[in-house]
Amino acid sequence: MESPSFDKSKSAVRIDSGDGRWNVKRAAYSIFAAAFLAAPGIPAAQDSATGKVSFGKCQACHAVGPGAKYKLGPELYGLVGRRTGAAGGYQYSPAVKNAGFVWDGTSFAAFIANPRGKIQGNKMVFAGIKDETEIANLWTYLSHFNVDGRSK
């Protein structure tokens, strides 16, 4: 019985050197790239609509958007580039006032994952969000608001 033949010229993926031998280096890079892109710990592209859904966890204490008012916590529009404890009219804890950093994606992710760990002594009562993709989506949503509360 004859085995079926394989026409490598019609293959969708060719990882050979052209002479029928496998190019091990190219194959290894391809496998590494596929594994890296599929890794569960790497956040996918940020999604503002999904971030808006996640913001539901924050709405009991925070507001965002035009006309947003302080609740138990400060409003969160214009957060990008704002120093901690700097939204006018809100009574921040001394810990937040003196935290000494500017809100960006990295500082927000560290804070929202563990609010009491990032700024010890703050008065925010929230266990945090552990999922990196959810955090990235939430940051993307909050980043769409200017200092006046309007969407960018």
Image (spheres, rainbow, N blue to C red):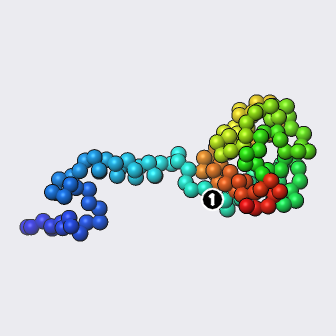
Query: Mark 1: which secondary structure?
Result: loop
Q: Amino acid at mark 1?
A: Asp
- Quadrant of the snapshot with the N terminus: bottom left
Identify which residue, 125 or 19, lies in the foreground: 19
Binning the other alpha carbons within 10 Å of mark 1 as few (below 14), some (14 to 19) or many (20 upward) gives: some
Q: Is residue 96 above or below residue 3?
A: above
- Residue at image x 72%, y 57%? 144
Q: Quadrant of residue 67?
A: bottom right
Q: Which residue is mark 1?
A: 47
Identify which residue, 10 or 146, lies in the foreground: 146
Instruction: From the top left corner, tell me how far across and down residue 101 is, in percent.
Output: 73, 36
Q: Quadrant of residue 142?
A: bottom right
Residue at the far left: name it: 1
- Residue at image x 15%, y 67%? 5
Horizontal arrangement in the rendering, residue 144 relative to residue 74 (left or right): left
- Residue at image x 83%, y 41%? 86
Q: Quadrant of residue 96?
A: top right
Horizontal arrangement in the rendering, residue 118 relative to residue 72 (left or right): left
